[in-house]
Image (cartoon, rainbow, N blue to C red):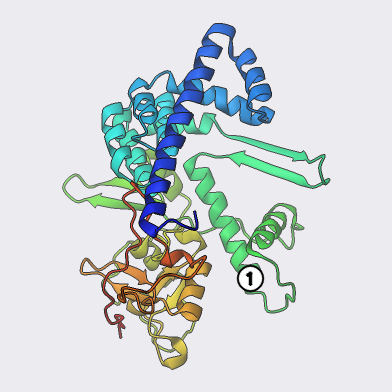
Amino acid sequence: MAGLSLLELRERLGLIKRAEARLAAMKTAALGEYASRGGEGLARRVALEELQASKQQARREVETASQFSQVSETLDALGAGEIPEAHAKQIAKAASLGPVDEAVLVEAARREDFGTFSKTLRDHQHEQSGDDGKSLMAKQRQRRELSFFKSSDDGMFVLNGRFDPVAGSRIEAALADEERRLRNDKDSADQASFNQRLADALENLVCADAEDRKPQGTTLILTANWDALNQKLAGARLLDGTPLPISEALRLACNADVLPAVFDTKGQQLWVGRKYRSATEAQRAALIIRDKHCIGCGRSATWCEVHHIDDWSKGGPTDIDNLVLVCTSCHHNIHDDGWTVHRNPNGAYELQPPPVPYADYPTWKPKPNPPPHDREPFPDTGISTHRPALKQPVLLN
């Protein structure tokens, strides 16, 4: 590998992606045929022995093979190396939950990255359900599960669960709120990692004494459009873009505060100047509606921090047009590595990396093990890390 050029390495990765897809199709087809002849129990046993999988992995492999039996076009595209394995598995699972237009999804899988395709698939399932997503939500809720066991390896307890989009979003919001509280606790000298704080947050929420337990009402943000012509809500979605049945949105709204998403006026506390350093709750809600996720890497807004574009220490105000959402990692990129916030012509914010020294010099070569933002784009995914000509950062006042 050390003797290959960047272009050759990129081509090699594309070859590997196609080979992995074809191997995945072969494995799925073989397991599916074995299960059809000998039954799923025997197929799981073969997966345990031949694939050296765990019992849980063997069960998932056979279940996936069964799902692919319903989507022959997807399996063909996977076998031809045209779509990634993860995309194909999503289509197969969606088809097991309700009606889908397989041809439309396969075509989208050929050109979209995983995150974009996941959103396309969710919207497609909602549209194809024919009942505003009610049947899909019911099937997702039927598949909820939680396992909790003590590991024989080290005596630690392991928690693993699956939840429908609404329940999962509520749990995520509660955990994120408690994790932020632990991180900002001035009395805590424990320099715990993010995952350790997350474990502590769950323990606090579940095991705190009744008198110490904080109210369980957490901020769960839903968005919906108001259909003025028909005088009703439409297009309800969760924070990550998952469409919701309007009946489910109304049920949640019965026990929630409703904040109209009219954030282009100064009626809300969205322009507070130098009065507060930290963003207000109204500002955070507005940022979640506007930015939707980390402007750098796309991580869920639930886990994001608020960054001042024009730095607070240099006189920057805590105003909505001077704030953006970034995850902890991207926040460090800004303050430690020179990344800058830019505003696109469409109004969306994004992070851009610092310029690479000597990038235009013909004899310049990257150092070994370059940081992620210096690497070549991934092949055939439509995702490019190519660095456009840098502009001056947009500093909003």
Quadrant, the C terminus: bottom left
Residue 229 placement (x, y as % from top left): 16, 47
Q: Is residue 242 visible?
A: no
Q: Residue furthest front?
A: 3
Above or below, 294 against 111 in this view is below
Q: Residue furthest left?
A: 229
Q: Residue at x 37, y 33 (%)?
A: 81
**Nearest to the observer: residue 343 or residue 49:** 49
- From the viewer's perspective, tell me whether residue 10 is left or right of residue 216: left
Specify few, some or many for label 1: CA neighbours under 10 Å numbering under 14, 14-19, or 20 or more.
some
Q: Which residue lies furthest to the bottom in this view?
A: 314
Above or below, 375 against 312 in this view is above
Give the residue number, with chain letter if any, for mark 1: 183
Q: Which residue is drawn at 41% across and 47% down?
A: 12
- From the viewer's perspective, tell me whether residue 341 is left or right of residue 299: left
Q: For residue 38, which quarter of the picture?
A: top right
Residue 61 placement (x, y as % from top left): 56, 27
Above or below, 141 against 233 in this view is above
Q: For residue 215, which quarter of the picture?
A: bottom right
Q: Which residue is drawn at 37% across and 67% down?
A: 286
Residue 225 placement (x, y as % from top left): 27, 51
**Nearest to the observer: residue 255 or residue 309:** 309
Callout 1 secondary element: helix
Q: Which residue is drawn at 38% across and 45% down?
A: 14
Please, what is the three-letter code of the amino acid marked with disc 1?
Answer: Arg
